[in-house]
Image (spheres, rainbow, N blue to C red):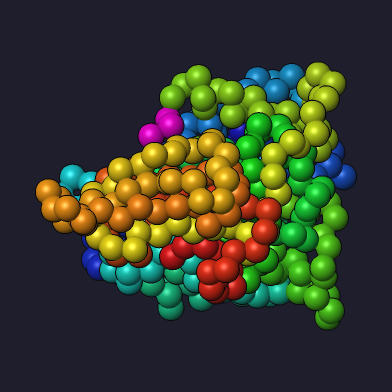
Amino acid sequence: MEISEIVIGGDTPGIEWRLPVIRFEGSDAAAPSVYIQAALHANELPGTALLHFLCERLRQAEAEGAIRGDITIVPQANPIGTAQSHFGELQGRFDLGSRTNFNRDFPLIPLGDRQTLVDDLDRYPATDRLKRQLLHMALGADLVLDLHCDDESLQYAYIDEAFWPEASDLASALDMKAVFLADGESSAFEEAVGYAWKYEAAEKAARLPGRLSVTVELRGTRDVYPEMARKDADGLWRFLAGRGIVIGDAVTLEPFKGPATPLDNIEMIRAPEAGAVLFHRTIGDTVAAGDLLATIVTAPGTERGTIDIHAPQAGLIVTRTSQRFARRRDNLMKIACGERTRAARKPGTLEA
């Protein structure tokens, strides 16, 4: 195991951040290589816990000569966000200086331009230097996993249709309850990786066999427990073994049984007005069209001071907000459905 650091100088004198990078060298140049990072949204820590336990297992495998493919791990990918605290609350999703989501605005370049990501880095602000170096590392691998989590959530993933259904082994290994089939039309990290591969040749590739770039949502922000992290690390180990990156016991993965839902079929349940949120249904529930999902208390104590929210169609509740006060149009739930939503959706990701 080799541990190195990428030093990112701050945009003001006397400030710098250090980004630890852990590498395990494989014994077989023909084996797939993998890049895994966690906590790009710095307050999303289930992935960091998973990688802590995975590295424990990988160190043992290294001692036994059981690592075939190169493995690069960045367990805390956003030291800039980790340093942002406002009134005691970690602010790891948005850069407070630029107001930009840390998982947006990654450069969209063809793979042949990979080296340009790290050329003349000093001309960019610190957040862009971080993004460019993360993307540069990822594009040196065959398989890329970006570990995140949602608010209150089942285990699920965003997977570009170019990698599906080949990526069903990952969904099965991590016991995902749902897969959201993405269209690859945003500047999020995993979609920037996919973009580089799709445009490696003159004609855009529709399928990318042998490659994978995925955002894994490891349940909710509060789901940071040793038993969960170990279970997820074991699942990721099975995925790596199944892909021939590590040598382990014979791996038999059950077929993925959850829904694989296009983003156009995800119902984003939003608050029509501001108020206290009273939920009637929770994550993991299967609902029918018209079922009561939540009540918004808009004018407490008055006769008509509530608004009921009903399911627009049948589906599986995959996520729910942990907040119990909503502003108008705040996201309350994501429901994976069998039919296309009637709500308008921009290409790309579901949220800012």
The quarter holding residue 173 reads top right
Q: Give percent across and percent down for residue 261.
A: 68, 53
Query: Image quadrant for the C terminus?
Result: bottom left
Q: Main secondary structure of the magenta part?
A: loop
Q: Is residue 330 left or right of residue 122?
A: left
- Residue 118 versus residue 130: which sits nearer the camera? 130
In reply to whether residue 179 is colored magenta, the answer given is: no
Q: Give percent across and percent down for residue 34.
A: 70, 45
The quarter holding residue 14 reads bottom left
Q: Is residue 56 in view from this perspective?
A: no
Task: Identify whether 251 is placed above or below 72.
Answer: above
Residue lying at the far bottom in this picture: please name it. Answer: 202
Q: Is residue 202 in view from this perspective?
A: yes
Residue lying at the far front in this picture: please name it. Answer: 303
| Bounds of the magenta segment | 220-224
- Residue 304 versus residue 118: which sits nearer the camera? 304
Q: Residue at x 53, y 57 (%)?
A: 312
Q: Is residue 6 left or right of residue 42?
A: right
Residue lying at the far left in this picture: please name it. Answer: 301
Q: Is residue 215 left or right of residue 207?
A: left
- Residue 317 versus residue 179: which sits nearer the camera? 317
- Residue 181 versus residue 5: which sits nearer the camera? 181
Task: Identify whether 132 is placed above or below 29.
Answer: below
Q: Residue at x 28, y 68 (%)?
A: 97
Q: Give percent across and percent down for residue 267.
A: 54, 58
Query: Image quadrant for the N terminus?
Result: top right
Task: Identify whether 66 is placed above or below 152.
Answer: above
The quarter holding residue 151 reads top left
Q: Residue at x 59, y 73 (%)?
A: 347
